[in-house]
Image: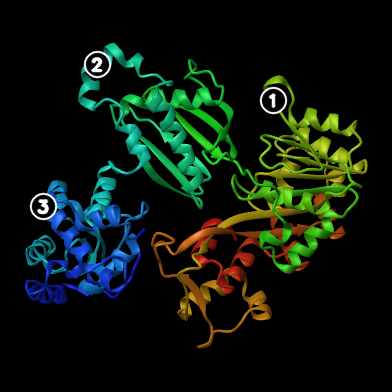
């Protein structure tokens, strides 16, 4: 991880320091370690002598032989050179543009690498900011640029360069890939021995396991394995906090083997490559923890198959208090959950937190007095007290079939994983009208659109209006990183944009005026969030409670606009309004709200 321990050394000050460096003892870099008691002066002298004799890196020798922690060595180097010490982090990103005219072999030999450019300033990681020859080379590589130096260990600089090349020497993934035969050997044997590269090879098995373990460690929600034709490398991408990034690339010859390995783990047909397949994996981590994965394969161009693996939540249900509802929304949700019968729907796109929210609601009413049945595909969250059924459409156990069975099993509360079709919707309406409380999810954009969608499916408007209690629409926004969050005074145009999106009338009634004290928040960017300014996600909500007036409009199949106007007049906050309130609270930014919410 890149960590700062001192102030920045500019290019000019580095050159001045270089002039003094010739008069300084070479061991002076580590004298601070002696002063702090990490080792004696004679031990340091011995280490320096041994490093010189065996052509070893002094810092590596001190860490390995004398067990001196890296932060202590970094602090000593920062003190000596008068600049930041940066330690390696796997999330460190190097801008490829900076490396365009530089040789990797040269950079490895001279132990420096440019990291990022901000306007006319280039940040450079180097092992010796006092070396005039290296500083001159950097200046030649980036003429006319302002240079800011960071000091790093040679081993860390090597790891940064190896990661850029796709060959991170200390990464277990690369250790596994290193066991695979070279591209040149493979090219020679391609036609004759491709079958010998099987999904059961030790390296392939461990590679698949390591990808899954690493995705879990990084908090990824999905893994994408993307093979390409024409001998291009297979990309492995992770989705973290809603955004995809390339984690690694696998040699093209192993695209079939890695895909087949995942299919075997999910009990899929490895011979069938022409049609999509779905499956699950129960995966045990090295810590002993077991997680569940949902696997989907799809045939893609070049006679390849893509694999998408979703990492399901292995934890129990969340509590309603932890879902960051506004006070009014949470109170209304709790009231709906206490109703004796009716339908409550959670709406939103895939991965917006619908199932998590429904389980949190069920957990709040999960008592001995209630019999709760759930039909899910898959069962992502388990909790005691619920009787949970996994649907299997391939054998005819659909949501609709399971719902009919529930009605004969004395339920008080029923939860359906997804309301996909008219048959399921009709049975849910029937269940609610016969005295059961029904919860379900549906893929729609807003609370009001949910009503229109179900009417378009062919549901009877009179029965539907009687059964419907409310619709909770959801989205997930990126959260401002708490480590680097800062306040700022926005421009008038930013303020006016918020007012327009929130609604001018509602804003005047509820929100502050524009004055010098008006502040918003943003992420400055730090190591914890990989310089993005965002870490984690926060939900925004839109709850429409069906009133008597709204039931009358539903029965007459009123247009969406009229339903929305009535809902807002009765106190409903839209997704955009709830998001803007979280912007004012400093939880997220309007840019992120606008990216996921519709007006």
Viewer-nearest residue: 511 or 277: 277
On the image, the x and y values in percent for residue 268 come to 55, 21
Q: Which element type, helix, strand or loop, lies under badge 2?
A: helix
Q: Residue 386, percent across and down?
A: 80, 41
Tell me the crowding category of disc 3: few under 14, some 14 to 19, or many 20 or more residues within 10 angstroms, Cα based: few
Quadrant for the N terminus in the image = bottom left
Residue ID for mark 2: 189
Residue drawn 57% across the image and 27% down it: 278
Q: Is residue 367 visible?
A: yes
- Which scheme is used to colour this image of the protein? rainbow
Pointers 3 and 1 in contact (C-beta within 8 Å): no
Q: Of callouts 2 and 1, which one flags the residue occurring earlier in the amino acid sequence?
A: 2
Of residue 302 and residue 392, the one placed in the foreground of this image is: 392
State the residue at coordinates (45%, 44%). 238
- Residue at which label 3 appears: 53
Question: In this view of the protein, which residue sits in the foreground, 147 or 214?
Answer: 214
Q: Tell me the quarter of the picture where residue 127 sits.
A: bottom left
Mark 2–mark 1 Cα distance, whole angstroms, equals: 43 Å
* Crowd rating for badge 1 (residues with CA inside 10 Å; few <14, some 14–19, many 20+): few
In this figure, which residue is indicated by the disc labeled 1? 393
Residue 94 visible? The answer is no
Q: Is residue 43 left or right of residue 544?
A: left
């Amino acid at each position: 991880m890149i960590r700062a321990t001192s102030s920045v050394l500019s290019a000019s000050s580095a050159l001045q320091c270089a002039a003094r460096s010739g008069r300084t003892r070479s061991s002076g870099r580590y004298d601070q370690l002696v002063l702090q008691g990490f080792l004696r002066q004679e031990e340091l002298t011995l280490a320096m002598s041994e490093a010189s004799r065996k052509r070893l890196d002094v810092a590596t020798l001190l860490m390995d032989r004398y067990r001196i922690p890296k932060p202590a060595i970094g602090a000593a180097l920062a003190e000596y050179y008068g600049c930041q010490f940066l330690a390696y982090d796997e999330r460190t990103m190097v801008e490829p543009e900076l490396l365009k005219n530089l040789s990797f072999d040269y950079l490895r030999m001279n132990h420096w690498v440019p990291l990022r450019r901000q306007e006319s300033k280039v940040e450079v990681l180097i092992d010796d900011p006092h070396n005039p020859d290296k500083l001159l080379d950097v200046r030649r590589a980036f003429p006319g640029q302002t240079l800011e130096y960071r000091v790093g260990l040679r081993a860390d600089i090597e790891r940064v360069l190896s990661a850029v090349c796709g060959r991170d020497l200390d990464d277990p993934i690369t250790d596994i890939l290193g066991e695979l035969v070279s591209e040149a050997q493979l090219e020679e044997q391609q036609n004759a021995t491709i079958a010998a590269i099987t999904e059961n090879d030790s390296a392939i098995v461990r590679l698949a396991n390591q990808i899954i373990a690493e995705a879990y460690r990084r908090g990824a929600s999905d893994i994408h394995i993307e093979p390409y034709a024409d001998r291009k490398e297979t990309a492995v991408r992770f989705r973290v906090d809603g955004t995809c990034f390339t984690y690694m690339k696998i040699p093209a010859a192993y695209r079939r083997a890695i895909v087949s390995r995942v299919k075997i783990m999910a009990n899929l047909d490895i011979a069938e490559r022409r049609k999509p397949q779905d499956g699950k994996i129960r995966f045990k981590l090295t810590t002993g923890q077991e997680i569940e994965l949902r696997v989907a394969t799809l045939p893609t161009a070049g006679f390849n198959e893509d694999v998408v693996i979703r990492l399901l939540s292995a934890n129990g249900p969340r509590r309603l208090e932890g879902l960051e509802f506004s006070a009014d929304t949470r109170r209304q949700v709790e009231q709906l959950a206490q109703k004796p019968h009716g339908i409550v729907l959670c709406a939103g796109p895939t991965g917006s937190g619908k199932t998590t929210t429904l389980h949190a609601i069920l957990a709040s009413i999960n008592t001995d007095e209630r019999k709760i049945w759930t039909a899910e595909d898959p069962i992502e969250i388990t909790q005691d007290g619920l009787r949970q059924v996994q649907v299997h459409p391939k054998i005819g156990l659909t949501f609709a079939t399971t719902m009919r069975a529930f009605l004969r099993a004395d339920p008080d509360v029923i939860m359906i994983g997804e309301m996909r079709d008219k048959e399921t919707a009709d049975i849910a309406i029937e269940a609610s009208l016969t005295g059961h409380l029904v919860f379900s999810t549906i893929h729609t954009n807003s609370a009001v659109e949910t009503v229109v969608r179900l009417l378009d499916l062919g549901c009877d408007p009179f029965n539907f209006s009687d059964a419907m209690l409310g619709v909770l629409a959801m989205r997930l926004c990126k959260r401002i990183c708490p480590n680097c969050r800062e306040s700022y005074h926005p421009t008038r145009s930013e303020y006016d944009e918020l007012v327009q999106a929130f609604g001018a009338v509602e804003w005047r009634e509820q929100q502050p005026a524009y004055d010098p004290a008006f502040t918003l928040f943003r992420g400055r960017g730090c190591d914890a969030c990989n310089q993005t300014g965002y870490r984690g996600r926060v939900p925004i909500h839109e709850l429409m409670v069906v009133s008597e007036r709204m039931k009358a409009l539903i029965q007459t199949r009123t247009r969406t606009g009229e339903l929305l106007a009535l809902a807002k007049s009765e106190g409903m906050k839209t997704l955009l309004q709830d998001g803007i309130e979280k912007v004012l609270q400093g939880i997220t930014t309007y840019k992120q709200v606008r990216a996921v919410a519709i007006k």
